[in-house]
Image: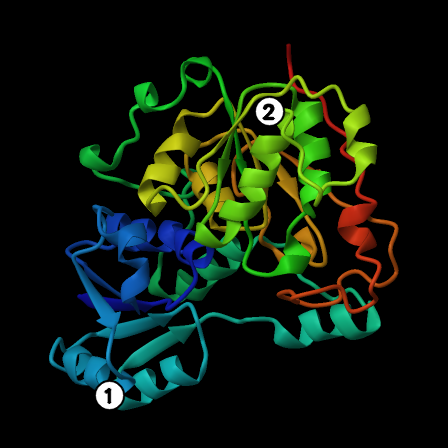
């Protein structure tokens, strides 16, 4: 039996499909698993031992469809369920199983604050998609695999970070899913341990501001009220300096992980790290909280305007950004 799984984006969403990949491969005898995604996410899946072949959306959907037709699949598992995947399913003309995106339920929650959301993690909804194939969930959680040469040697970090550090993924796909820089600094100050900041090139400047603050080189961009903090934390800014799987390696080797709702959160869950998950304009009830690992949710539950989107915005629609500005950092790390 040859099965095609489709999920085009993004990093976190693709990591969340890994239990489906695993149970199909391990519970169906002699099955061949193919996965279609975008080329930019190749690193997320290239080392997954349960995938027999990857297919990429490079040039156009028509080129990909031609490639997929030649494989003669027995069925398709569509874990994206958008216009492009509908075109692929129609073009291949084989049996398909499609993930329910619960768009109506999300719309009701965002627009009217009527909660009809199913009390299920998105992984369990992915797994429900393939239940008709006769497979059931296992208890192994998420998977994330990297090659040996992508591991980040801790001796590459400054000496004070090599034995004990906290990873903090400060990025996010949308600004309303990220703490403002001043609040990142306040959170780092409370963590009060060596912290490695992780993120993409777009997060590098914010990471530099945080690092400079704790080196007592505060810039004019940070107001004077932050000077009252203890400033005992030490910070290493790795944002924009590493490839994805090097960041994943640092997440794996961290003692704790603080993170916004982003791909590195799900990678941390795959490594069974203890996670402190920070939520802004979206809510964990959409089903994207850390899966099968110990976690603490940091969110402002008192706002009537939240959630204001099922994804995010470039800025707060109300202008106050209280979901992040007024969030209470209510946690304690073991001594």
Counting from the top left corner in percent of width and height, residue 222 is at 72, 41
- Closer to us: 195 or 206: 206
Instruction: Quickly name the residue at label 2.
Output: 215
Colour scheme of this structure image? Answer: rainbow
- Tell me where residue 152 sits by quadrant: top left
Counting from the top left corner in percent of width and height, residue 199 is at 48, 45
Instruction: Quickly name the residue at label 1.
Output: 62
Q: Nearer the viewer, mark 1 or mark 2?
A: 2
User: Which of the two labelled residues, at mark 1 and mark 2, occupies the earlier sequence position?
Assistant: 1
Q: Please state if 165 lies on the left or on the right of 192 as rendered.
A: left
Counting from the top left corner in percent of width and height, residue 159 is at 41, 14
| Quadrant into which the N terminus falls | bottom left
- Closer to us: 165 or 223: 223
Question: In percent of the image, x 20 and y 84: which residue is there?
Answer: 63
- Element type at marker 1? helix
Distance Cα–Cα, label 1 vs label 2? 53 Å
Estimate how packed mark 2 is, as few (under 14), some (14 to 19) or many (20 or more) residues with alpha carbons within 10 Å. Answer: some
Q: Please state if 22 lies on the left or on the right of 281 as rendered.
A: left
Question: In percent of the image, x 42 and y 39: which residue is there?
Answer: 270
Is 56 placed above or below 290 here?
below
């Amino acid at each position: 039996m040859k099965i095609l799984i489709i999920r085009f984006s993004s990093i976190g969403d693709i990591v969340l499909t890994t239990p489906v990949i695993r149970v199909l491969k391990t519970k169906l005898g002699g099955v061949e698993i193919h996965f279609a995604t975008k080329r930019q996410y190749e690193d997320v899946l290239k080392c997954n031992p349960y995938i027999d072949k990857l297919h990429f959306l490079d040039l156009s959907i028509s080129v990909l469809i031609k490639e997929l037709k030649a494989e003669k699949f027995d069925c398709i598992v569509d874990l994206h369920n958008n216009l492009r995947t509908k075109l692929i399913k129609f073009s291949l003309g084989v049996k398909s199983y499609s993930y329910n995106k619960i768009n109506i339920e999300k719309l009701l929650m965002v627009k009217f604050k009527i909660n009809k959301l199913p009390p299920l993690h998105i992984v369990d909804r992915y797994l429900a998609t393939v239940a008709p194939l006769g497979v059931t969930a296992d208890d192994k959680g998420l998977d994330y695999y990297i090659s040996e040469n992508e591991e980040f040697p801790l001796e590459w970090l400054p000496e004070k970070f090599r034995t004990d550090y906290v990873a903090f993924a400060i990025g996010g796909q949308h600004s309303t899913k990220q703490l403002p820089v001043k609040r990142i600094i306040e959170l780092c100050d409370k963590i009060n341990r060596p912290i490695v900041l992780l993120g993409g090139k777009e997060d590098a400047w914010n990471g530099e501001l945080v690092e400079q603050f704790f080196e007592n080189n505060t810039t004019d961009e940070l107001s004077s009220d932050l000077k009252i903090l203890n400033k005992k934390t030490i910070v290493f800014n790795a944002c924009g300096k590493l490839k994805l799987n090097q960041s994943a390696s640092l997440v794996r080797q961290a003692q704790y992980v603080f993170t916004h709702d982003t791909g590195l959160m799900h990678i941390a869950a795959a490594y069974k790290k203890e996670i402190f998950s920070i939520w802004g304009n979206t809510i964990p009830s959409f089903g994207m909280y850390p899966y099968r690992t110990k976690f603490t949710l940091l969110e402002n539950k008192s706002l009537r305007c939240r959630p204001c989107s099922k994804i995010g915005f470039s800025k707060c629609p109300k202008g106050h950004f209280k979901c992040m500005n007024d969030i209470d950092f209510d946690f304690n790390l073991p001594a």
